[in-house]
Image: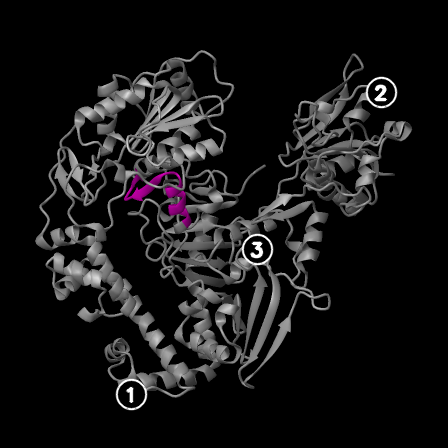
Amino acid sequence: MQKPFQGLVGKHVVDHLYAHITALSSWPEALRAACERAASLAGLVIGEHVNVVKMHASTEQLSLLAYDDFDAAPFPTLSKSWRVHLQTSSVVFRDYTQSRNPPVLHRKETLLPSTDPRIAQWSALTHTAEALGLFEDTSRIGFHEQWLEQIASKGYALDGEEFIPLANVAAPHDEASAITGPVQRHLTALTRTNLSAPVQALWRHELINFEHSFFDYGCGKGDDLRALLENGIEAAGWDPHYRPEAARQVADTVNLGFVINVIEDLDERMEALRGAYALTRGVLAVAAMLASAQPPDGRAHRDGYLTSRNTFQKYFSQVQLRDFIEHVLDEPAVAVGPGVFFVFRDKLLEQRFLQRRYGGRRRDAARAWRTPVRTPRPSRIAEPRAPKPSREEALVAAHGELLRDLWQVHLGLGRAPLSDELTPALSDGLGIAALSLNKALSLVAKYLDQAEVRSAEQAKVDDLLVFAALGQFGKRQPYRDLDPTLQRDVRYHFGDYRAWQCNARAILHELTDLERLNAACVTASQYGLGWLVESHSLQLHTSLVPRLPALLRIYIGCATMLVGELSDFDLVKIHIRSGKMSLSSYVDFDNSPIPALSRRVKVKLRELDLDLFEYGSEAYPSPCLFWKSRFINEECLNYADQLAFEDQLVRADLNELINEDRTTAQFAAELESRRWQIDGFALVRSANLPELDKACGGHFTYRDFIERGETQASTGLPNRPRQPATYTALHDLARQVIDPVVDYFGMVELTYGFCSAELARVIPGRIAPKLDQHAGHELTRTGRPICDRLGAACDFVVADEDMEEVALWVAANTPFDRLYFYGKDRPIHVSYSATPARQFVRMTTNASGMRVPRIDRSVAVFSTAPIDAEGA
């Protein structure tokens, strides 16, 4: 089956194509022209405003994307996007510059032409991410925060272009008092919520399993052990501080995770490595902290650093760590991730590991393994010394955390703070660092992002305007009664109290200007704040209201004076032209992909009145909220899961079931009729066994497919499927293949359908249950599918039709799996499965009079139409 854009340079995602602008020259002229027309419609210049193009599968629309940090960031975040509908000449703009969780781009090297010199460097980063298992669940990594969570869940953090193991953390700056005495190694032990990086690597490479024992040498607080024991793994551990009484015992797999880097004595460090290896029967995992581009915290001590808590850290490079392990153990160390190595005592196990690793993990790999040739160590070349930092740069490096705290205060106020507006800890920190407030602010202004300051100042101005405008409806406080910080805000941002109040009254008058109101709604939607029906309404989640332009926040504030707390509702809808606003509450809005409406309040601002509607009773059932992602954004809870759910709805061709008046129960029943269920934020196939007389597709029941055939009729065998998946397969066969035939040719006669194992045993003649798919998803006594092809099959005939014509039509117009044609007046056999082979087989008679199958590759077969499932 030909896929859209096959053979073109770029990153193929489902049926879409992403490409960097440097790759466009290799595209066909028609696609390049479409890009230029889209840029013209959006008022953009490709290469100046846009650096990535996304072609949608329909080719009737495309997206122009701007990644401000495409070259510098290992995983760039989206800054702006323009989605252009070429047929309607419309443009939908979205600005992510103020989003705290913008979309993130992975595998950026795949967007480039093959001659680009950057591919090698960026591919290496992708290979590391793949080795760490970061792309195992791609539905949850499309946004920046979820991507960082995924990295952390694998036991790593992203530092520049390096994945650094999450092991020991530096003490917070408020614990920076000097500590004397012996090195406190036990303070480096972390409390984990995920398996550590080396244990995840062992699990990922199947070196931890139910058949082998595991020992953690230096287990710390034992979080890895608890997780493994809870999953049924035989695991034990020893730690000199937390488990000194535990026995150090031999095991198949041993972990020495982030131990050698906290031991300040070199001889003792080497002894720990030897001791762990001595307990190893199969494989030893060794992990240690890697040096990052940032200077280490703490003061130099021996070959490492002492932190403020008197803990020791030795930072290795990847090459240094490998060399240390190999020097001490005199065994090759195999890198499996940044800062993580395996050392095999069992050489056969090592060979199998390497065979799986380099052979794509194929289960049918050759049985005779050869020990791979060791890669020679790279020669060590001295790096040039970095230039000595300036005095200011040294101050920023030494007091970075303190300056970041001051920066946050600055952003919160929208202006430079005064000394009495600092927290005691911040004031004390400046004193200890011998930095005046003015000097600290000058450092902040010079080395941190000034764009954030301008954004913070505008946000503070908006906050002050909203406060003053809504204050016009009550008794206004005189300037002298204002909080001192508020007085300073007013002076800084407006000059004086009178100007502040005049600006507030002016923006209140703008509420009557419908064009200004509409423009504010358009601006909000461009920043991902709500679903805009232009010139009609803007609807969004109430948690996003504080991010709206001041005019809209005042408009909503006027309504809440009548209705009460905004936090009591989930969605707010601004009716742009009618002077109304709707506030809605839903049942478990955050955790339901299709929540049910429970209450709605319509506020009529012009009449200063409201209407209340309660739902959930028999008289007023609760309608569903569909396409919830429209009203939330990437910063909201479960947004990525919501997008994935809605994409499933589209790809399962279920959007025709969506009706805004449907209740939750009605929609669930409609889904069940299609053999689907909602499980959290996932669509899954139904696990229920339906009644035989329930509809199976548009023209038949399940009984029609099950109680069918001469042998079943003559024997009276029940012939009932036991597996829910078999009913699902019969349903899909009916909807995808049989229903279209009936709609085109008229009613068909089913001559043979589902065949249970019991029925197969009594059918006379030659049948092939392991191949013909009549058994559906039924299982043998040992639990294996009777037919590995799965799916479902039936035989049918259309009265008074040439069955060759019918067969050819089925092949060209339905997503069939396999079709067997026996003759112009004979029933045809057709099957459907989730992985269709698209095989048209003619049954011919050879010279011996035997029927033999022959695949006819000349027949035109069905090719699925592409689906554009991108959200708005």
Which residue is at a point 85% across and 20% down the rendered structure image? 764
Query: Identity of the amino acid at label 2?
Result: Pro
Mark 1 secondary-structure assignment = helix
- Residue 159 lies in the magenta stretch: yes
For image coordinates 17% across by 29% down, the residue present is 265
Between 527 and 16, the one nearer to me in the picture:
527
Residue 7, image x, y percentages? 47, 38
Closer to the observer: label 3 or label 1? 3
Residue 112 quadrant: top left
Q: Position of residue 220 (x, y in %)?
A: 32, 34
Mark 2 highlights which residue?
764
Three-letter residue code for mark 3: Ser
Would you say 710 lies left or right of 285 here?
right
Tag 2's secondary structure? Answer: loop
Q: Name the residue nearer the viewer: 186 or 579.
A: 186
Residue under pointer 1:
498
Which segment is the magenta one?
Answer: 146-164
The residue at the point 21 percent across, 37 percent down is 313
Q: Is residue 551 above or below residue 303?
A: below
> Mark number for residue 592?
3
Alpha carbon separation for disc pair 3 and 1: 48 Å
Mark 1 surroundings within 10 Å by alpha-carbon count, few (fewer than 14), some (14 through 19), many (20 or more): few
Mark positioned earlier in the residue sequence (2 or 1): 1
Left or right of 854 in this view: 602: left
Q: Nearer the viewer, residue 520 or 559?
A: 559
Residue 157 visible at all: yes
